[in-house]
Amino acid sequence: MISRYAYVGGTSVSTAEAAPDLGVECMKIGVMLPLGGEDGPDGGMPGWRDVRAVAQAADQNGLDSVWVADHFFYRDPDGRMYGMREAWTLLSAVAASTTRVELGTMVLCASFRDPGLTAKMAATLDEVSGGRLILGVGAGWHEPEYEAFGLPTDHRVGRFEEWLEIVARMIRGETLTFDGTYHHVKDAQLDPAPARRIPILVAGHRPRMMRLTAEWADAWNTAWYGAAGNRVVERLGTLREAVRAAGKPEGAVAATVGMIVRDPDQPSVPDPDTNAFGGTVPELAEVLTAYRKLGVDHLIVSPEPMTPKTVERIAEARKLMAE
């Protein structure tokens, strides 16, 4: 499932302007979209129609967001290859095929795209979507795709630190000159500028990544879990500590959590994740409530299987939680 291909928590990761509010009283809930590997019907490669069907199911059933992972491919330790669709192209098409859900990247790999280009892409997609983009970004981690596409693997977090600062400052309206070790821009600006402050999400839990999160991000993510447990509580505590150390008020960076949910009423997906929660809809509603009580602002669900029916089931549990 797609959760295997999204960032691994340990490797992916100010202005005076107020950060956008990503949280709501009843905790936002979104879903990952099928992107590659075995995410499609009958365990095959999903086509555009499959991606669109899941996105529109989320849009029409009251969920809050849809998300795509960003990889060229995934190769498991045994050498098996899983192909992937290109994330940004698909997300642009999803933007034009939905009306209300937020559109997130979980997470965009900094190594794949120049920071100035990324900022320009974000501004344009936010315009196309009517202000629905959440720009999730990370340093990247999957060595085989770096080697295959000739990408540098040295100082990955150092490169990301410069990349993130450039992207954040540009989409927040600065005309920027930056002369770093790895990235350079001169009098760079976005014209036209974004109509709003596009929220940036960073994922990770190690100290350096948490510092960058507290400095530049509007939201943070940790993943992937089943039911809420002690590990989630610990990671949420790590976020609070980082925000406090940065001298910002608690809640300045929204907490998002990735959860894997299996639909027991549908055929099992190939190689299912053993960490997935597979209970009934009322039981799922109780788990969603537990995440909300922990202070999670946005729960991002990776469904197994990735079908409109599973999305509808998650939406039903969300309604029970709200009641």
Image (cartoon, rainbow, N blue to C red):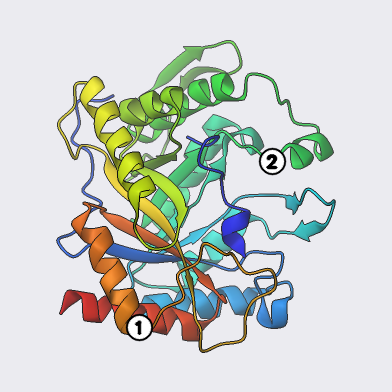
Residue 43 location (% of width, % of height): 71, 77
Residue at x 45%, y 70% (from the top left corner): 277
Nearer the N terminus, badge 2 or badge 1?
2
The amino acid type found where label 2 is placed reads: His
Query: In which image quadrant can residue 259 be found?
Result: bottom left
Residue 222, x across and y down, in percent: 42, 46
Q: Which residue is mark 1?
A: 281
The reply to whether residue 292 is in sight is yes
Secondary structure at numbered mark 2:
loop
Give the residue displayed 61% in from the left and 78% down from the top.
50
- Measure the alpha-carbon separation of dots 2 and 1: 35 Å
Q: Residue at x 24, y 21 (%)?
A: 245
Above or below, 76 against 157 in this view is below
Q: Percent position (x, y) of residue 313?
A: 40, 83
Left or right: 142 in relation to 220 = right
Taking the spot 59% from the left edge, 64% from the top edge, the residue there is 273
Q: Is residue 251 left or right of residue 161?
A: left
